[in-house]
Amino acid sequence: MSPREPKSAPHTVAVHGGEPRRHPEAAMTAPIVQTATYTFEDTAELRDFFEGRTERTEEYGRYGNPTVRLFERKLAALEGTEDAAAFASGMAAVTTAILALSKAGSHVVLFSDCYRRTRQFVTTFLARYGVESTLVPPADVDALEAALRPNTKLVISEAPTNPYQTVPDLARVAAICRERRIKTMIDSTFATPINLRPAEHGIDLVVHSATKYLGGHNDVLGGVIAGKDGLVGIVRELRNVLGGVLDPHAAYLLLRGTKTLALRVAQQNATAQRLAETLESHPAVARVWYPGLPSHPNHEVARGLMSGFGGVVTFELKGGLDAGTQVVDAARIPRIAPSLGGVESLIEQPALMSFYELTTEQREAVGIKDGLIRYAVGVEDADDLIADLLQALERA
Ligand SMILES: Cc1ncc(COP(=O)(O)O)c(C=O)c1O
């Protein structure tokens, strides 16, 4: 099944996409080609390789690896794109793609609720190299359009975002940018290609922290970008210089994880929806943010773009920081940890995790309330997770 045959359902593509019908030695699974370099029989073979007279693709580990290539092909098949390039982490993918598409004097626009390390990279690191940037309010496409300048080269968004799960109208973002020849990049980590395929809505580059749902088992770091041949090729070339390549063993874990992606995400969607509905009617809860709830400000946009709303539910407790802490500590099934998308449910209080170094006032200024909890559901039984969270809420 090649990346250009995306017509099967996502469940089938997740299992077979990008992989040959037969692996070497007739093995059922992809071999881990654990090598740093590749040998040439003689200089004639070397010449044939460099002059394109051979089918052979590998030369040196930083430039490519067959196991990594299979993961890239599977992701391209799932996203319905021509190509994909894999990286050592989500941030290696994000930073390499942004570097490849910007230069001194160019301007980048981001929604202000992008992953904070992406924001930090653009607004502080790239600023030192003469790249200008503008942050626009979450999901506000009018503000985004107004922020575009003649030197804008790239627009970056996420869908859904963390922690309030905003979902901008991607089709509108893509249309506005295409008209002005501006490239669009969406971090689709929270959505996965099961729930959302941004390329179908005209987005140029899709990026994932594969560490989350794609790997799905909280045991491997990785990243990937997917898009058209030419664009992915430009990013891959820079990756091969910067060196943030995916290790073959990690690629195997990601290939293996991705095979069950559709199953896991279907269950995580269903559990999160039930959890969000339960929380919304609970007296200790001030507010719930989940794009599958009609009360979410971007529910209609999300319904138009997504076939499921993901496994993360964010909610605010009326009792503030202390109540949040009591609930997090009283929940018995989810583990306290950063990250999301794995088989194990994870719970965290953003005020005590990503935003720990800020004061309550500083957190308020960036929109993070002290009583906020992010619950990333795993694949445990939904009834068990809900019963567990209800007993924890009793203590708040
Ligand atoms: C939306 C999003 N993008 C990118 C990243 C970075 O990915 P990684 O941790 O794999 O570098 C994260 C990590 O939390 C994330 O949540």
Image (cartoon, helix red, strand yellow):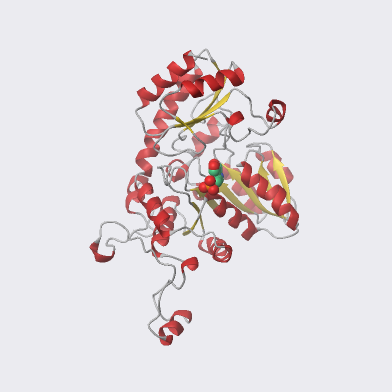
Quadrant placement of the N terminus: bottom left
Figure quadrant, ligand 1? top right
Residue 390 lies, with reference to residue 145, above or below; the image says: above
Q: Residue at x 45, y 34 (%)?
A: 311
Side (left or right) of 187 relative to 265: right
Outermost bottom residue? 44
Whether residue 210 appears in this view of the structure is yes
Q: Residue at x 54, y 31 (%)?
A: 300
Question: How far from the left and from the top, in percent, is residue 170?
Answer: 57, 43
The number of callouts visible is: 0
Residue 200 lies, with reference to residue 269, above or below; the image says: below
Side (left or right) of 100 relative to 385: right
Q: Residue at x 43, y 29 (%)?
A: 334
Q: Nearer the viewer, residue 95 or 243?
A: 243
Question: How far from the left and from the top, in percent, is residue 337?
Answer: 50, 35
Q: Residue at x 70, y 52 (%)?
A: 125
